[in-house]
Image: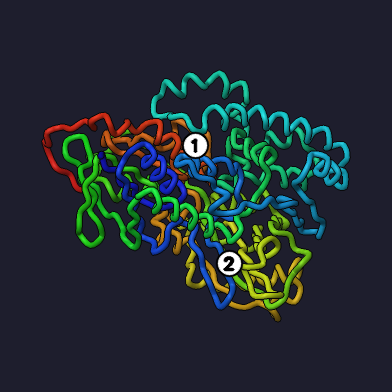
Amino acid sequence: MNKAIVIGAGFGGIASALRLRAKGYSVQIIDKCERLGGRAQVFEREGYKFDAGPTVITAPFLFNELFELFDKSREDYVEFKAVNPWYQFYFADGTRFNYGGSIENTLNEIAKFNPEDQKGYLDLVKKSQEIFDVGFTQLSDKPFHSVWSMLRQIPALLKLRSDRTVWQLVSRHISNEKLRQAFSVQPLLVGGNPFNTTSIYNLIHFLERKWGIHFAMGGTGALVDALGKLMTEVGIEIKLGTEVRQLVVEGKQITKAVLADNSEVEADIFISNADPLHLYRNMLSSRSSNLLAKLKTKRAKLSMGLFVLYFGTTKKYADVEHHTIWLGKRYKALLRDIFQGDSLPDDFSLYVHRPTATDPSFAPDGHDSFYVLAPVPNLKANIDWRAEGPVLMKRIIDALERTILPDLKKHIVHEFYMNPEDFQREYLSEAGAGFSIAPLFSQSAWFRFHNRGEGPSNLYVSGAGTHPGAGLPGVISSAKVVDRLVPSPIRQVETTQPREVEVGV
């Protein structure tokens, strides 16, 4: 039986491991974290539980497929519960907009801001569906490692006006400024600025509309545990707390991975779920990747960084929804400072996750658990996080107490945070970027890092930095692309007499 090694146990790596196991490979998955899930770690503090990574589940069928590969049912492992509203938007003037549920629900909410935008919203949904039918249904699980695959899609991309940004598309249909903000934030969920992210990513809007927003009972960590149980049942070897430092190339193929303790593991197929920038800069020697990988690595534009604050409260805030998008006074200017600035802005916008609204197990009885995410500049900016981290945490707590969490300081417990330096150290994320490279048109499809590795012939890549992109649907779909590309194990993997041995440094 041919052996495959998966480097990185994020969702893209887990999905790749399961798909290759179903294909017939002997599979080992290796990750430097002590727990499966990549960024989907779990923190616990005296009865409070906090999901560290993704908290929103869309396209649940993608997870169902992973269990169905082995004739099993996801429902027997973990429960998904629909959330409504999907998000509540809280604006700086105190007004609120509930987004989610039926079209009629959304139209009724729109009418509170501008009834004339109701027709525009229907047109926006129709346009988003057209983009979804191409960008997701037709292309999200198809390889884009050949330039011809990109050229074949140019007519469709031109027809969809992919040259427009998400903000431009939304603004063509919606006139109210607050509603424009609400319907353009989706790119931020995958690391993009709505003002320069291609409108192809507006497919997220219809993705939410088609399947809704779900929450895994027990948290995203429970979903990771369910997938981990499945991997164990089907014979996948799991090795945690172990970093892959180098990939050894002989001739045109990787022959083995060198671990942090200098031990080595051999395989026929290697799938990297690491940040592609880390893969090509640190794990492979410069001579082992091709010119295209070198160009992409050199010119890569990164997503923003993330500051994530976790805390419990000794009371319940029952009027706070499961998902709140807390928007500050600035929108475009704030995003410019986050993506292009060299210092930490004085203001912020926030994503507030209150899982106890749906699952009381996240906190002791009568208490709440919170996860508050603020987009911030990545480590390319000149920010001293040892000094700025505590200050930003205090400013966020002050702002929440003034608005949606009154008397927060009286009830807050076990507060702590992660900043971009933590993302770089814990997850080997280049410059602490929250979502690898940004979802620009110039970094999408063929222009993104390829799922067929750009160098050794037996290297494949899954995860946020490769096609189709970040977010749970994106990284799970990247494993479907890898599955299409990896040959069946009944076919002998090409071998070449070694001409030279190269070790990444």
Give the Cα distance between marks 1 and 2: 29 Å
Figure check: 223 above or below 369 = above
Figure check: 196 above or below 330 = above
Q: Quadrant of residue 427?
A: bottom left
Residue 131 is marked as none
Query: What secondary structure is marked by label 2?
Result: strand
Residue 468 is marked as 1
Q: Position of residue 68 (x, y in %)?
A: 50, 40
Residue occupying image coordinates x 64% and y 75%: 364
* Left or right: residue 93 compared with residue 58: right
In this view, the residue in front, 196 or 313, is 313
Figure check: 103 above or below 265 = above
Residue at the spot of label 2? 309
In this view, the residue in front, 143 or 433, is 143
Q: Position of residue 48 (x, y in %)?
A: 59, 72
Q: Nearer the viewer, mark 1 or mark 2?
A: 1
In this view, the residue in front, 15 or 309, is 15
Residue occupying image coordinates x 66% and y 48%: 213
Figure check: 44 above or below 423 = below
Query: What is the crowding at mark 1: few (fewer than 14 residues within 10 Å), some, or many (at least 20)?
Result: many
Query: What is the crowding at mark 2: few (fewer than 14 residues within 10 Å), some, or many (at least 20)?
Result: many
